[in-house]
């Protein structure tokens, strides 16, 4: 039975229940079949550590107690997924203000406004409506999840934490492992406090490992 703090490899596909539209998948063949393929995306099985907020809490909870090679079909309400739609997060602005910032608004465009990610919903009569809710807020979702295997190799476990906890991609860092000693070099400016917090968390989750970062 899988338990909290186990590292596992899984594949998954997420769909919007009402439309059956795929919004996320680890499988390149499904992405191409469903016309959601992104050439900049990284496809393939994902490695996560259970109970560490690397996936939606409802999915985490469902996987704990399951077995390797199980396939799970999980229906999530908005409350269990990305929340209900908050109407206070839908704003209407002057279209000229966006044009001055070299943003040419059209429905579906995602923009960053003062650190918030928003989606243009409509452009009418000089006014633009921007929705700052999560794009999947208010949606009922269905996930199909295949648990492939338990991961015990320390380098692979550490890779998953660098990606899942720090939001890095493999191109953003180098990781050298020798015995139980890990040397991590992040290729961009990164707060020392976050590095230290990551080091402590990784050493808690991966026993007997020494980390320099």
Image (spheres, rainbow, N blue to C red):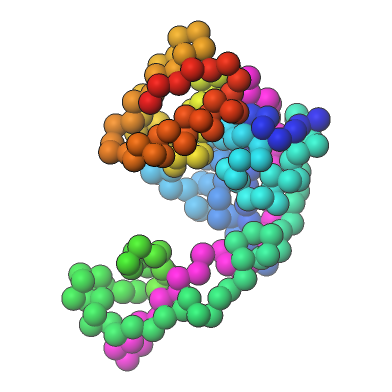
Q: Position of residue 164 (x, y in %)?
A: 51, 39
Which residue is pictured at 31% across the width and 74% down the height? Answer: 105
Q: Number of numbered discs present?
A: 0
Quarter holding the N terminus is top right
Can residue 104 be seen here? yes
Q: Residue at x 53, y 80 (%)?
A: 87
Region rendered in magenta: 123-152
Q: Nearer the viewer, residue 194 or 50?
A: 194
Image coords of residue 48 (percent x, y): 59, 35
Q: Nearer the viewer, residue 209 or 170?
A: 209
11 over 114 or under it: above or below:
above
**34 w.r.t. 192: above or below:** below
**What is the x, y in percent for residue 189?**
28, 38
Residue 168 belongs to magenta span? no
Image-based side of 66 in relation to 100, left or right = right
Q: Is residue 2 above or below residue 110?
A: above
Residue 92, horizontal then vertical, whole percent: 38, 84
């Amino acid at each position: 039975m899988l338990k909290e703090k186990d590292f596992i490899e899984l594949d998954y596909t997420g769909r919007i229940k009402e439309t059956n539209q795929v919004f996320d998948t680890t499988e390149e063949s499904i992405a191409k079949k469903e016309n959601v393929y992104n050439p900049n995306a990284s496809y393939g099985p994902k490695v996560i550590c259970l109970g560490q907020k690397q996936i939606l809490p409802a999915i985490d909870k469902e996987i704990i107690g399951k077995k390797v090679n199980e396939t799970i079909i999980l229906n999530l309400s908005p409350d269990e997924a990305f929340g209900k739609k908050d109407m206070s997060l839908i704003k209407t602005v002057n279209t000229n203000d966006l044009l001055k910032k070299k943003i040419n608004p059209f429905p579906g465009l995602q923009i960053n406004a003062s650190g918030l990610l928003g989606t243009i919903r409509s452009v009418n009569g000089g006014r633009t409506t921007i929705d700052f809710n999560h794009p999947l807020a208010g949606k009922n979702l269905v996930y199909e999840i295949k648990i492939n295997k338990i991961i015990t190799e320390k380098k692979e476990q550490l890779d998953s934490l660098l990606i899942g906890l720090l939001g890095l991609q493999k191109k953003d860092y180098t990781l050298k492992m020798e015995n139980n000693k890990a040397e991590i070099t992040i290729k961009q400016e990164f707060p020392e406090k976050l590095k230290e917090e990551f080091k402590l968390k990784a050493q808690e989750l991966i026993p007997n490992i020494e980390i320099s970062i």
